[in-house]
Image (spheres, rainbow, N blue to C red):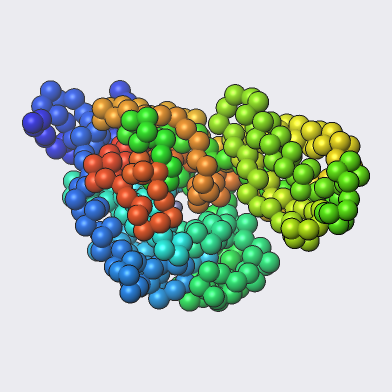
Amino acid sequence: MRRRTFIKNATLTGLGITTFGLLDSNGKAFFGNNLKVNGQRIETRINELAKFGRDEAGHGYRVAYTKGDIEGRAWFMQLMKDAGLNPIVDHGGNIIGKRKGKKPSLKPIAFGSHIDMVPDGGNYDGTLGSLSALEVIEVLNENRMVTEHPLEVIIFANEEGGLIGSRAMVGQLTDDGLKQISQSGLVMADGIKAIGGNPDDLKNSIRKKGDIHSFLELHIEQGGILENENFQIGVVEGIVGILDCEITIEGFANHAGTTPMKLRKDALLAASKLIIEVNEVINSVPGNQVGTVGKIQVQPGAYNVVPGKVALGLEIRDLSWDKIEMLFSEIEKRAATISTDTKTTITFMREASFSKPALTNKSLQQKINESANSLGLKTKFMQSGAGHDSQQMATIAPVGMIFVPSVGGISHSHKEFTKTEDMTNGANVLLQTILSVDRE
Ligand SMILES: [Zn+2]
């Protein structure tokens, strides 16, 4: 055990830092390097939060804007109050708690996640990052440690319904978005009102580029890579971009008994060839890109009719938009050949709802990696295949994301689980990364 001595307002001129810091037994300053989160407290609180909105099956139900979400948020805000964070709800419905730093002129280091869930979702998606953000504050309070920068804990509203709160925060929630029906059944604008926001005046809550020093989010991986490859921490390099495209193949519907094989314009046959080509194109270059045909509709859809028309849903995801475009145009090229061979026409209609990749900040990636390594944890640099509030925050601030393993890679299910040890590791990495960012 290391012995500690408090030093009051010592000026560590060598580092250019004035601090209310700590000395270890060798007289060396450490700015909270040995602070540790209370993993048991995180787990207990995850289980408490899981009780809100319980259904007959005993599963929590905190879909945004529902009773469970509203009650869960009230519970969370009380914990924030108890921790001295004086939480407020911004106009987008996001909960924001602030802790003063020694230098009020510095921009705040922000961190957090979300506590809403998908229907029948699990207890760790979003909640781990939210409760760990609060845990960082608790540990700093208990150790009477004040950071240089102000700190902000942000709990985003309705992440699962399309990153609604974080979109509102960065000025990307449109009037059309406000009119959409949310999973709760409420129109988005009414949902935002139900949790204390003000959809008529979103402008007043917008955070601009430069308003926030950095944003950090701890999240469960929601996939099986870390567990499979035996890593404890994922350093997220970015959140993948998504291109969705509806492909329509038109042939000619005709009698399946009387139309000879060589005279057919079979749209489903063309679609089948194209699905295989999509898979081959995606696999034809190295990398982590994924491509899926996840939807197929056949018309008229009868045993005795040659298929006349097929609609396919194609999706491509990668961290590089250029790569997505390159793969997409190769698919188009191969489709042209199939079209000629099968005497069908193939048209591509890109969906308007594409999302560009959001890269995390390189320096924050390094800080996360170093913090994890200093704790003896094995890290893997990886991409996030799922969307997160961090991708919205990346438009206004440098962003860093920390992943911890999901058991069995299961998520968006009540079977979702992350071990206490992994949650504790992730929260400790979050804490140390915040302190590391604060030191620069
Ligand atoms: Zn999430």
| Position in image of residue 60 (x %, y %) | 34, 66
| Position in image of residue 193 (x %, y %) | 51, 75
Q: Is residue 419 left or right of residue 162?
A: left
| Position in image of residue 69 (x %, y %) | 40, 69
Q: Quick one: 25 or 234, which is closer to the camera? A: 234
Q: Is residue 367 visible?
A: no
The residue most toward the front is 257
Residue drawn at x 88%, y 53% is 258
Residue drawn at x 68%, y 46% is 314
Q: Is residue 251 visible?
A: yes
| Position in image of residue 123 (x %, y %) | 34, 57
Residue drawn at x 53%, y 62% is 161
Q: Is residue 20 left or right of residue 171?
A: left
Q: Quick one: 291 or 210, which is closer to the camera? A: 291
Q: Is residue 156 left or right of residue 148?
A: right
Report which quarter residue 122 is drawn in: bottom left
Q: Is residue 258 left or right of residue 320?
A: right
Residue drawn at x 65%, y 45% is 293
Q: Quick one: 361 or 247, which is closer to the camera? A: 247
